[in-house]
DNA sequence: CATGAATGAGTGTTCATTCAT
DNA sequence: GATGAATGAACACTCATTCAT
């Protein structure tokens, strides 16, 4: 499988044959970009193929149809999304404020600055037409993130660092500013640029301290 | 040719309803629903027309093309979005916490529970392909909302109700949980229902008090 | 302009109602222009109506459909086309050369400079899709013109003015330069303007004298 | 899907004939016929495709749109139209009358009997809506033909074969009967058949000798 | 494996025609 | 008689999908 070209001409021939098993991943990556930019319906397989450096017929060697490519593209980014954050919470030695700051920092790096946000856009744009994708993403990313945050909040309460009566059932509230920032990056950023780091600091500040003056 | 109309359907046949003034609004409303559900590209004008009770050719009596209908649909919901909230801030008699609670309540009613959220979805999904729409929406809705929030925050500071050092340049942080809730309603609500009122309360609680215990 | 109700009664009202029976002719004229410019298929009834100052529904008060208007438009210009020339030939007192010059002069005025040429264009463009029109036009215009020319040629022969062996069965040859000039006016005139009068003189000169030098 | 190939039609199914090089020419030819018959607007790409043995989508593999096919079809017949006649004039050894007869013979073969006439019809029908085509055709065919004729006429004069005072600036007059015959073939031929060869002889006769008797 | 020519089922758009007013 | 809103049948053009090479 690796040696397709039976030593054809001894030197030149391994030109584009070099990665047979890289193809699906390349197509997925290309598809992901196109789908994120244009949405499912407006994405042309010809453009996906061109971005991956092949012709559009080639896509069908690896994916049954456009939708299969779409699903594969989404899946490629959902599962591992928070895997690495998981461990941190369990083993973090310091105070919970520091833990929260660390987790938020990671969120901003990946979700807001990184390209995880395009999955978010796709979910919002196309999610309801692909319910199992939405469900899968919810179960494997959103849910886990919620649990993670809940653990952190509980840790804060248990250690007396956070108020005992914080609304622990709604951890999304705590993370919401980052999600909103991710949206902003994909919409209004060019008209009204956001200084993400300062925004993130404001986020942490308000979530930790609230608005009210401590009279 | 002789047997044309002999009591064929007894009641229904009032085709060609003749309503020049109502039509554009009906088409816009129908279009808005379809565009929000399917996105621009996946929306079929035939479906829009059917939803408005006409045939697709009729759309072209009122709109130059699909894109013109799309723009009209968006515009129909952007401008007046916060007009009514404007007045409240200037004239509110009570303390700023109450004002903020009131404004948040309105936000949840309109943006999260109401159908303003579908505009938000469209902006996220299609915005970058229609830059002037995005810019218009930003200028006429987002910007005004930001200024509104900033005024409230400043009012809180000036009256000594809010901390003097809250990050007043990032009012989006304060409102973000509502925006995220609006998204949630359009994506994961069916898999993981959110009690909006409780969520809103949690939002207000955390934004006002923060997480930290007041030792 | 139609919907202003003030002072309308009493004085103004005979505004556009003044010619009920002028309508068909106006529509025919408008149609003729449009059909000549764009051809049958590319002509829009809306444009015809606009040119006649009515709305397109009005056309159907006078003509069964687009094709009926087309036929009516053609017919309006075919029959009387040569009627007036007929008499000249029979009664002309002078020599045949003068008669031919006179007839040619009329041809150039009407067919080449005038708007009879647009019928010619329509015949060439659309004729084979409307065979009865073509046949009608041939019978009522072309045929008569041919006979006319034949009579003139015969007159010339009989009077010893023309060669006895001129090809009397092909009178079209004699008139052809005028027909070609009519085409030219509608095609290349703007890129390569023709001085019609000089061309007409050349036409007469060659037809009468031929090219050969009379040794 | 299961019943694919069980000896269904025994011979025919060689769909997708795979002929990248032949296709454009086939489509052009098919288009030329349809355009000449129906005109640009009335020609349906589906018919063009059917005539070429493909489906209409295939056209778009080779031509950007209907107009591009139209232009290509016209161009396919304009340039080489008189190329071969060019040489004859320069090298012809005999007298100018013979030369003219030869050139006229070629004209009748190609323009009147052959299918070059359909280009003429298209120019008259559609020319003014495609000005560059008209200009291109004028520059590459009409103009050259005019120059050619002028050269012949001048040759005749210089050799003393033609009258010194023939109207050399209007060579179109000399060729016009052939052009008119080409039109005739496409219009009235079926109602009033023309014996082309006899007509051509009459043309030559009159152009050379004129009508007047050489008293 | 990969190509790319070809297909065919759409969808946006146009426009002749109808009909209630 | 005249209007103009509405219809519905086309038709140009697109693009996911197939398949011979």
Image (cartoon, coloured by chain):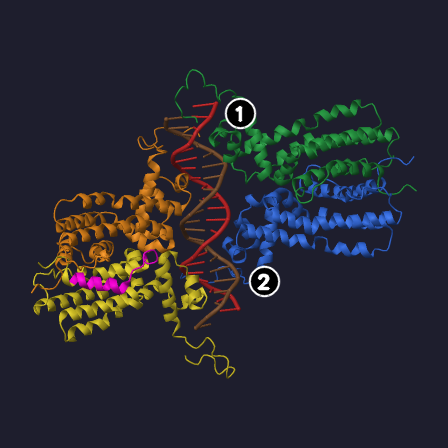
Chain colours: A yellow, B orange, C green, D blue, E brown, F red
User: How far across and how far down the image is residue C101, in percent?
Assistant: 79, 31
Q: Is residue B31 visible?
A: no
Quadrant in the rendering for residue A195: bottom left
Label placed on residue C189: none
Image coordinates of residue A76 in percent, x first then y, are 31, 68
Q: Chain of mark 2?
A: D
Q: In which quadrant of the rendered view does residue D52 lie?
A: bottom right
Measured as percent of width and height from the top left, residue B99 is found at 15, 48
Disc 2 and disc 1 on one polypeptide chain = no
Q: CA distance from mark 2 to mark 1?
A: 56 Å
Q: Is residue C197 visible?
A: yes
Q: Are marks 2 and 1 in contact (CB under 8 Å)?
A: no
Residues in magenta, as a range:
A187-207
**Residue under circle 2?**
D21
Quadrant placement of the C terminus of chain D = top right
Position of residue E9 in the picture relative to residue A188 (left or right):
right
Q: Nearer the viewer, residue A25 or A167?
A: A167
Up the image or down, C8 lies above or below C201; here it is above
In this picture, residue A56 sits left or right of residue A81: right
Image side of residue B201 versus residue D66, left or right:
left
Question: Which of the two residues, B70 or F15, is positioned nearer the viewer here?
Answer: B70
Q: Which subunit holds the residue at mark 1?
A: C
Quick one: label 2, few (<14), some, or many (20+) residues within 10 Å?
Answer: few
Mark 1 residue element:
helix
| Badge 1 density bin: few <14, some 14–19, many ≥20, Cα 10 Å | some
Q: Residue A198 magenta-drawn?
A: yes
Residue pictured at 71% horizontal, 39% vertical: C181
Of helix, strand and loop, which one carries label 2? loop
Task: Find residue B187 and report its horizontal and vertical position in percent.
Answer: 24, 56
Q: Please say if E3 is above or below D87.
A: below
Q: Nearer the viewer, residue C60 or A144?
A: A144
Residue corresponding to mark 1:
C23
């Amino acid at each position: 499988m690796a040696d397709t070209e039976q030593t054809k001409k001894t030197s030149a021939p391994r030109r584009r044959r070099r990665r047979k098993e890289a193809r699906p991943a390349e197509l997925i990556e290309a598809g992901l970009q196109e789908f994120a930019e244009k949405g499912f319906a407006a994405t042309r397989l010809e453009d996906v193929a061109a971005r991956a450096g092949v012709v559009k017929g080639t896509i069908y060697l690896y994916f049954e149809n456009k939708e299969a490519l779409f699903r594969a593209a989404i899946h490629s980014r959902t599962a591992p999304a928070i895997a690495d954050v998981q461990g941190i919470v369990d083993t973090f030695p310091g105070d919970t404020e520091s833990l929260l700051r660390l987790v938020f920092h990671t969120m901003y790096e990946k979700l807001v600055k990184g390209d995880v946000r395009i999955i978010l856009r796709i979910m919002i744009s196309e999610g309801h037409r692909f319910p199992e994708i939405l469900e899968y993403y919810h179960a494997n990313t959103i849910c886990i993130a919620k649990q993670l945050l809940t653990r952190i909040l509980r840790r804060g309460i248990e250690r007396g660092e956070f108020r005992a009566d914080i609304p622990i059932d709604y951890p999304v509230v705590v993370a919401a500013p980052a999600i909103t920032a991710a949206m902003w990056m994909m919409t209004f950023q060019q008209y009204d640029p956001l200084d993400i780091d300062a925004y993130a600091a404001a986020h942490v500040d308000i979530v930790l301290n609230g608005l009210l003056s401590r009279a």
